[in-house]
Amino acid sequence: MGRWLHMNRIRGNSVWLPANHSQGSWMWRQILQSRTLAESFLKVVVKNGRSTCFWLENWSSMGILLQAAGARGCLEMGIQVEASVEEVLLTHRRRRHRRPILNQIEDEIVSARSLYTVEDEDVYWWKVKADNYKAQFSTRATYDQLRQHQDRVPWAAEIWFKHHSPKFSFIVWLAVQNRLSTGDRMVVWNANVSATCSFCHVNIETRNHLFFTCSYSKKVWESLARGILCNELTTDWDSLVQIISRVTEQGKEFYYPVSVPVDCLHYMERKECPSPWHSSVYSCKID
Ligand SMILES: [Zn+2]
């Protein structure tokens, strides 16, 4: 895909040059819009300067030169906005300028020229932490810098534990925050949707009802968890989260195999197999 984009979209120019945002696929337009964000994560170690845009990429100690000098800097320096670093190193003649920032750029050119090696390609470094760059891109490190950091919630270890199943954990993560598409929430989005529980066909389907207080779910839960939770067995969602969080803090993991899969089974059962036939099979297995 990268090669196709270079041939059909970039066409020998730099991806950092201004482009028409109305052309191309949605994905391509998103990439173009992300350039402002991406440029703060990139640093170029110039070798021959061939693939690096002189004005638009972060290769100098001054950062992105267009930002430092402004748009008129291109005219004052006599260097076109699309020029590569190599073109500048090989053709530019030093001059004195009124603006000190332009004389600083002249110094950068002299410095880069002393390191110029015609056979070596430029190296791109990605920021993994503040002032820490590496040659390899890390999705994790990049996302960690982009995301909003908040305090760890007490139930985090209950969901994101060692050997967890991502599908189950994601469902429970939504459930703990009451963000599943249960009937009570769906009916707010679309009044024509039935909000009645798919299991008992009596009550409104809320998170608490679906997982524990529904007569059907309660039967499943009690059959599976009674032997483990003993006298702490509860059908109250918040109480259960507190119990498991407390046990997790004590370093015990024996609740995990029961709580997380059962939570998810309830939801997936209701989402994927709401037929009475399936429910009867399920209840037979429990009995
Ligand atoms: Zn029900």
Image: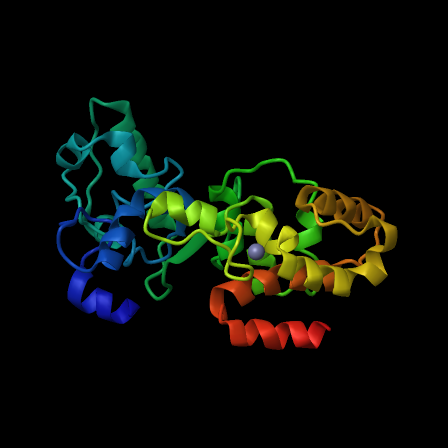
Looking at the picture, tell me which residue is in the foreground, 97 or 237. 237
Residue at horizontal 58%, vertical 36%? 150
Coloring scheme used? rainbow
Residue 106 seen: no
Q: Position of residue 249 (x, y in %)?
A: 80, 45
Q: Is residue 94 above or below residue 158?
A: above
Residue 88 seen: yes
Q: Quadrant of the N terminus?
A: bottom left
Residue at horizontal 56%, vertical 64%? 167
Q: Quadrant of the C terminus?
A: bottom right
Q: Position of residue 126 (x, y in %)?
A: 46, 51
Q: Is residue 181 above or below residue 98?
A: below
How many dots with numbers? 0
Q: Position of residue 91 (x, y in %)?
A: 19, 50
Q: Hey, which quadrant is residue 194 in on the image?
A: bottom left
Q: Position of residue 46 (x, y in %)?
A: 37, 53
Q: Answer with left or right where residue 191 lies relative to residue 23.
A: right
Q: Hey, which quadrant is residue 230 in on the image?
A: bottom right
Q: Is residue 155 above or below residue 202?
A: above
